[in-house]
Every structure is written in C-alpha cells, then in structure tokens.
Amino acid sequence: MGGKDGATWALLTVVLATSSAVAQDYSYPTPPPQRQPYSTEPAYPSPPSEKTSSHRGFQGGFNIGVPIWLDVDRDVVRPGADLHFFGGYDIGYAVFGLDLGAMWTPLDLNEITGLPTGVSPGRSPVTRLYFAPEVRVQVPNKSPILPYVGMTFDVNWWRFRETAIGCNFWYCTQVAVFRFTPGFTAKAGVAFRVKQGVHIDLGVKYSLSGPGDFFVRREQWATPYLGVLVR
C-alpha cells in the first residue's frame, strides 16, 4: 500500500506541475480600456456630397420666351412667342448640345404708315423654325444656384404668308415656303434648383440674323425666357 500511495502522489505532482506551466504560458485576452463612455445617440449616415464639377451626364431643358425685336416699328412688329428645346452632354463646367425651336412674331400691318385709305392688310405672324449647336459654360457649386452663359450658331427658316404650288403625279396643292438665313445667339441665365436634378431656368438671349434669303438687312432681337432645366 505504501508503494501505491507513493506512486499516486508522484503522478499527482507531475500533473499539477504540468498544468501550472501551461497556465503560465497561456495569456488570456483582455478587453481594451474604456477611455470614453459609450454614446447613446443614434448614428446617422453621412449625407451624399453635392454634385459640382465632377457631374457628367445628360442635361436638357424647355423654355418659353418673348422675342422683342430691336430697331423696328413697335406698333407694327409686336412681341411674340418662342418655344425652345435644349439637350446636351454635361461635363461639369461645360455643356455641348443642340437647340431646336419655333418662334412666332405677330405683325400688325394695319399700323404701317402711309397705307391707302380703305386698305386693311390685317395681322399675320412671321414664323421662324431653327436648330443650332450650342456650347454652354456654367459654374457648378454646392449652392442651389447654377449660373451659365452660352452661344449658338443658328440655322433659321423664315416664312411670312409665302406659298407655292407643289404637284405630284396625282394632284397639286398649295404649300408654305420657308427661306433660309444664318444667325447667332448669345445667352446668359441662372438655374435655381427646386429638387435634386430639377431647376427653374431664367435668362435672356440676344439673337442676330443675317439677310440670307429672307431679310433685306441684318435683324436682331432679345428674348427673355423662363423654363425648366434637368441636370
């Protein structure tokens, strides 16, 4: 019995010594020190950054203007209406696009000085159809205001009461005749953002037309306009 007890105590001594060595070699992880108290406020995602000069994509717009002719008899040549569409590629500080539009200017021919007694020509509009490549320079920023300037080289077709007879194999009919003039337009405006990507567009443009096949001299007019711009 004494021999068995001695062997048992020797085995227990070895096991305890081994366990102590393992415990000394192993280090338990400790939590990092809490230097600041936990915040009880909810965490909100950071707001998206405003689009500035890095914006690239489509820009389009539509506006309605009132053309006012310069150096004319205002009793005869009345303010009219201009419907204008614009679309282009926006690279931030510049836009390259195309303009399409139609313009009408009413003429009150009864106000022409020196008409014979009893002659009443009435009122008729001068119609202008046009398209033009446009280059626009703008100042993108983090505010809701986007100022810009632009210029276009206009291709115009004009008509005033002129018609012609056009015939095909079956019949003849009366058709409207439009005549070409080259032109130029400079514009300046400010777009006010009302929600993301949508702006109210306010500006004025100055247009110039050469005589071409319609006028007898160079003509010019100014057009204040109001519309919507999408960017």
Image: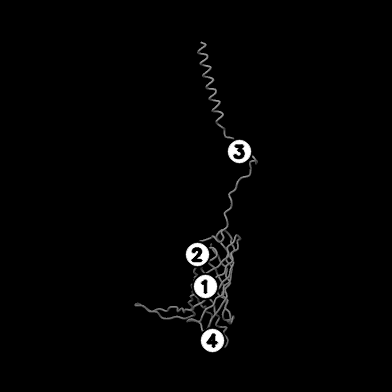
Mark 2: which amino acid?
Tyr
Asked if labels 3 and 1 touch by Cβ distance under 8 angstroms, the answer is: no
- Chain-order first, disc 2 or disc 3: 3
Judged left or right of residue 165, residue 160 is right
- Residue pointed to by mark 1: 152
- Residue pointed to by mark 3: 32
Which residue is at the front of the view, 54 or 203? 54
Residue 228 is situated, as x and y percent measured from the top left of the image, at 55, 65
Q: Residues within 10 Å of mark 4 (few under 14, many from 20)?
A: few
Separation of disc 1 and disc 3 at Cα?
A: 66 Å
Position of residue 26 relative to residue 12, above or below, is below
Residue 75 is situated, as x and y percent measured from the top left of the image, at 59, 81
Residue sitting at x 58%, y 79%: 70
Determine which of the numbered discs, if any, sits on residue 119 in the image.
4
Query: Which of the 4 image quadrants contains residue 185?
Result: bottom right
Query: Which of the 4 image quadrants contains residue 194?
Result: bottom right
Which residue is at the front of the view, 69 or 80? 69
Q: Residues within 10 Å of mark 3 (few under 14, many from 20)?
A: few
